[in-house]
Amino acid sequence: MDGFRSKHAGKVPIHIINKHAYIWETQDVAFVRTEHHICGLMTGTLPMLNQQNIFLGLPLQLFPEEVVLLMRKGVAVLIDDVNAHKPATMSEKEAYEKAYKEDADQQRRTTLSLRKKTMAAYVSRNQSSSSSSAANDKRAKREEAKREAELERRRQHESEVDHQLPDPEDLKAMNERRKEEKGEEEEEEEQLSKLPYLHLTHGSSSSLPWYHPDSSSTAYTTLSSAAEAGLWTYPSNQSERASCAVFEDLHRRGYYMGIGLRFGGHFSVYPGDPLRYHAHYSATVYTTPGQPVNALELVASGRLGTAVKKSHLICSVRLREPTRPEEEDGSGRSRYDHSDDAAWGEVEYFSLSWAGFGT
């Protein structure tokens, strides 16, 4: 990612996978939240706790409207994450395996060093303890009696078998000769090979040598170029453009937006960072000012908003006409102009709350 950072200085890499947008780096998450009021939704979890949904982490998944806003402001780059993973060359594989082995060796050496320190501290503590106390004497006698009983049991067992086992003293002398022959280094290497180590699978691919996100075929700096490549086609119809218009207008007014599904709308609207404030509004987007609204929907929206202590915003959008004729993208949907500096249109807001008169 160093080449990408130098080529696109000051821009946030947004990784596109199957039409979903993710941010993987911690500094990028902090940047879009503090500087551009983009909160997204943390979706990462721990491998051993994949069912928990309370303490989520990286990556940060962005709403489509958030992606469009960041691209229109010129602070992000869309990365085709699938095509950015090139086939690994032999040298890249060797470099990756070398780094992997070096990390495992470092972990093992650290573990062996800690074990030696722990053993030395244990021996020192036992040597410094008083051996003249009555309790220690009794314990020593009990241990000695156990050893004598174990030796007697072994002697009886050895007398029953047909073959004679090697003498323990001979085995000890043999081991000492082996250690002298191998040397201290080989003995340490043998100990290291038996120690476990931790393999950490990184979520981001930025450290992989065969990951190249900075090529012209994988990085897109405008919505138009990403749409032409088929990587990111949002917004592609009037409803999606209306959502972008409302999101951008509320963002311009200083609000933070979150998912509005749990409050019965398209967006939850916060007066400040959601970590500090509760949402004041739940917003529902209507594509055109003349779009009919069912009376039951109005009542339900008002009652639901009041129940969760929020006002319900009805957001009516008067979209501007496209600067070029609408074209078909092959899926039956109209493709609109993705010009990064053009206004979406005018947005009007109506606040709805349940007064409760007569109830």
Image (cartoon, rainbow, N blue to C red):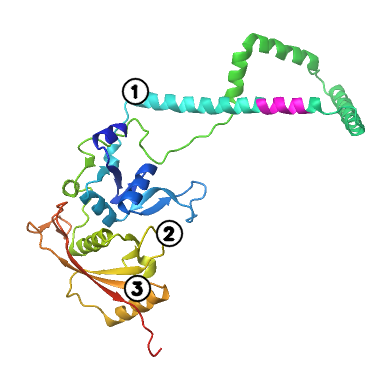
Among numbered discs 2 and 3, the one appearing first in the sequence: 2
Among numbered discs 1 and 3, the one appearing first in the sequence: 1
- Residue type indicated by callout 1: Ser
**Residue for badge 3:** 311
In this rendering, the answer to whether 55 lies above or below 143 is: below
327 relative position to 120: left or right = left
Tell me, yes or no, whether the highlighted magenta stretch contains residue 124: yes
> Residue placed at 25% from the left, 35% from the top?
214
55 relative position to 123: left or right = left
In this rendering, the answer to whether 224 lies above or below 332 is: above
Q: How many numbered marks are there?
A: 3
- Residue type indicated by callout 3: Ser
> Residue placed at 66% from the left, 25% from the top?
116
Question: Disc number at residue 276?
Answer: 2
> Residue placed at 35% from the left, 26% from the top?
92
Check disc 2 and report its element: helix, strand or loop: loop
Residue 310 visible, this orientation: yes
The magenta segment? 117-125
- Residue type indicated by callout 2: Arg
Among numbered discs 1 and 2, the one appearing first in the sequence: 1
**Residue for badge 1:** 91
> Residue placed at 67% from the left, 12% from the top?
178
